Amino acid sequence: MAGRNSHDKENVKIVCRNRKARHLYHLVEEYEAGLVLTGTEVKSLRQGKASLPESYVQLRGGEVFLVGCHIEEYSQGNRQNHDPQRDRKLLLGAREIDRLQVKVHERGFTLVPLSIYFRGGWAKVSFALGRGKKLYDKREELKRRTDQREAEREIRRSQQV
């Protein structure tokens, strides 16, 4: 799972992405985990009604949870509808959880959710081990991207003439 590209083209339907993650964090290692959901949560996710930007992944008592992810209540749900902000358990192997715990506690990394998607009918979460970027890192990256865009623009202009 670690280091594996979790968005292979086989039966993947992306529900939502955390676009800010790559801007705010240096992402080191990506992971994929199953997501424990109730029936109405699954139906709501299939309609694309989820939001990730304010969420994070937390290690608690040897288990991993997705905290702060908002999954809207299912519109046709009855009184048994789910709580939109509840913590959702992630399914990972014990060895993987142990490795993550060591990295998070000793090296100062954080776990950042990147996307929620369905792979072959199963709800999955892609998250990464990351370290927060400093303001100057963000500015540097923005400047680098702007310079690259301008260079590509100049190349296109020179090819048109």
Image (cartoon, helix red, strand yellow):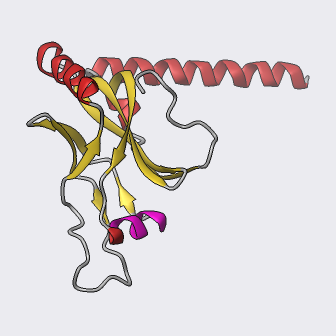
Instruction: Give residue 150's quadrant in the image.
Output: top right
Q: Position of residue 68 (x, y in %)?
A: 21, 52
* Percent coordinates x, y for residue 69 in the rendering: 27, 53
- Residue 98 falls in image quadrant: top left
Identified at 81% across, 24% down, the residue is 157
Over which residues does the magenta segment extend?
Answer: 41-47
Tell me the quarter of the picture where residue 146 sits: top right
Residue 33's place in the image compared with 108, above or below, is below
Is-magenta flag for residue 52? no
The stretch drawn in magenta includes residue 44: yes
Viewer-closest of 158 and 35: 35
Residue depicted at x 70% and y 21%? 152
Where, quadrant-wise, is the N terminus in this rendering? top left
Q: Is residue 25 visible?
A: yes
- Residue most toward the top? 107
Left or right: where does residue 161 sit relative to residue 28?
right
Residue 78 in the image: x percent, y percent? 28, 86
In this view, which residue lies farthest toward the right? 161
Give the answer, above or below, for where 26 lies relative to 48: above
Q: Residue at 46% of width from left, 52% of height from top?
A: 122
Q: Residue at x 35, y 76 (%)?
A: 74
